[in-house]
Image (tube, coloured by chain):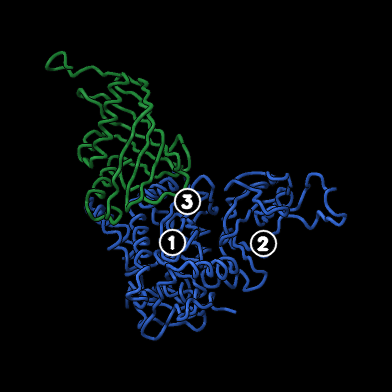
Chain colours: A green, B blue
Amino acid sequence: MATSTNRPAAMPADEASVAKFLFQEAALIDEERLSDWLALIEDDIEYWLPAMGDADEAKRSVSLIYDNKTRLEDRVWRLQSGLAHTTDPASKIQHIISNITVDQVARDEVLAHSSLVLFALRRGQQTTYAGRCTHRLRWRDGSWHIAAKKVVLLNNSEPIDFLQFIV
Amino acid sequence: MVLGSELSIGDLVKETPTDFIVHKRVFSDPLVFDQEMERIFETGWVYVAHESEVAKGGDYKTVLVGRQPVIISRNSDDNKIYVMYNSCRHRGATVCQSEYGHSNYFRCGYHGWTYDNTGDLAGSPYEDGYQDDFDKSKMGLIRVPRVGNYRGFIFVSLSPTGPSLEDHLGNVRPYIDLFADIGPDGIDVVPEHIHKSFYNGNWKTSVENPNDNYHFEFTHASLQAVYERRGRPTATMAAGKQRRSSGKGAMMLDLGNGHHAWGGFDGPGTDWKNYRLGGNSMPPVFIFPNVVLIDVQIRHVVPLAVDKTELHVHLVGLKGVPDEINEERWDHHHEFYGAAGLGAPDDWEQFERFYRGSLSRGDEWVRYSRGLKYEVADSATGKRGVSNEKLPTSEVTLRAIYRQWHRAMTSA
């Protein structure tokens, strides 16, 4: 809620606000509104899915995804292009977000921890993924933006076939 | 072996001067798969590990050789690598449960039999329960008949007889040398750095792919478009162009014994020196039957069923270079490879479609005839090749696989 026409609302570092945002983020992805999702992404984004368990540092470890803004834009563009054979047919997905906790880490940033269950359906086969997410959310201009998103999938060191969607 | 009344295994690959066709059963029949396991994976030389995966005494790795579980372990006393069947001599249970680890002993959890990491039986509980002639020294984990190490690449054969590893590797050895020497102080493969994937298709489709020049711009159309949108030369096209525009003598090669790569009859050629440290640092080399050296990876192909294949992609670090070089190499890798990659999954999708289509019998055969009319043989080395100037999208590299397949599957 703005207190004046010039000042955006102060950062609500509470679980309810963060949860609402995470649910909205999930809905955008599930509904394939990826351009709207990209509008939430900060320029210094680090979108990271480690492989082989968890890691602190992406540069010397194996990752399923390790995207800066450019690569993430390429990823989204490719998924929406209709040219990728892995999207013919495309996966239908459903995110379930739960177990949310929030830590304020800066004047305008929080870390949001959550549990994820992700169902992916392709060619009649439904695969379930689970993992822990950490979002670094930045409050800017009266709304949340995503500065970092890390997802540690339970099965990230097991053979995986197609992760051809936004996790 | 006879499949039904109409075909034997030997009939499934047909080569004439004008045609090279492979029967769809080769990709979809579980009976053929079982024979492949027996005659290729559980008889000939197969890749199991790079020695740096078991670098220190006590380190071990477990893998499947065909269908058979084995342990690769480095003994602390003599620092040698031993490969033994992962099966207790009592009732056969596996004694080692992890893919990687460190232990001087393997203990069977069932009845407590304990082996050291050369496979010798260190002890079993209540030994007096056996006959007086129970000879501990003969009750160790059985070691596989042959283990070979070429430039750090470890291969095993479950048959005590057959060609030596050097003979099997033959013309692919100079390529392994190139790969092993990319790092000034060698290469490093560690258990933490693996991408694992699987696809519901046949293993042979993925070992065709690395030197299937024909597929790039179609299979990877989406990645090509991503690069064009950014004004980048496409990795796929660049690789294709390298092969297409390499100097006189650059050919795609059937190296013999099932291996394939590109280069010339007299060796890999000087173009390979250009592939050193940058992102796309190793053009593809296939070592029959189950390992590909490409880019910054060792790709270990693990067939589980006729229609299920795992790919264990080991990212290779270079020793003796600044960290930034390895980081750059791996960053390039991450864009293309892995289940979320922008490149490799489009290949796997085709492998699955290949399998599903191979269940149809309208046309019982699939074709590998591209460039057959341009193929030339080198009697000195046994290599066969097609010049990139004649046809860069030939399938001579794919024919290499099926020529060896036919030999291995029909040998006495």
Q: Tell which residue pokes out farthest to the bottom in this image.
A: B17
Left or right placement of residue B88 versus residue A4 in this view: right
Q: Secondary structure under badge 3?
A: strand
Q: Chain of mark 3?
A: B
N-term mark: 1 or 3: 1
Residue position for label 2: B144
User: Is residue A34 visible to the viewer in this orientation of the structure?
Assistant: no
| Residue at mark 1 shares a chain with residue at mark 3 | yes
Observer-nearest of B242 and B343: B343
Q: Secondary structure under badge 2?
A: loop
Residue position for label 1: B307
Q: Chain of mark 1?
A: B
Q: Residue at x 44, y 66 (%)?
A: B204
N-term mark: 2 or 1: 2
Front disc: 2 or 3: 2
Q: Amino acid at mark 1?
A: Asp
Which of the image's four quarters has the N terminus of chain A? top left
Measure the alpha-carbon separation of dots 2 and 3: 27 Å
User: Is residue B43 visible to the viewer in this orientation of the structure?
Assistant: yes
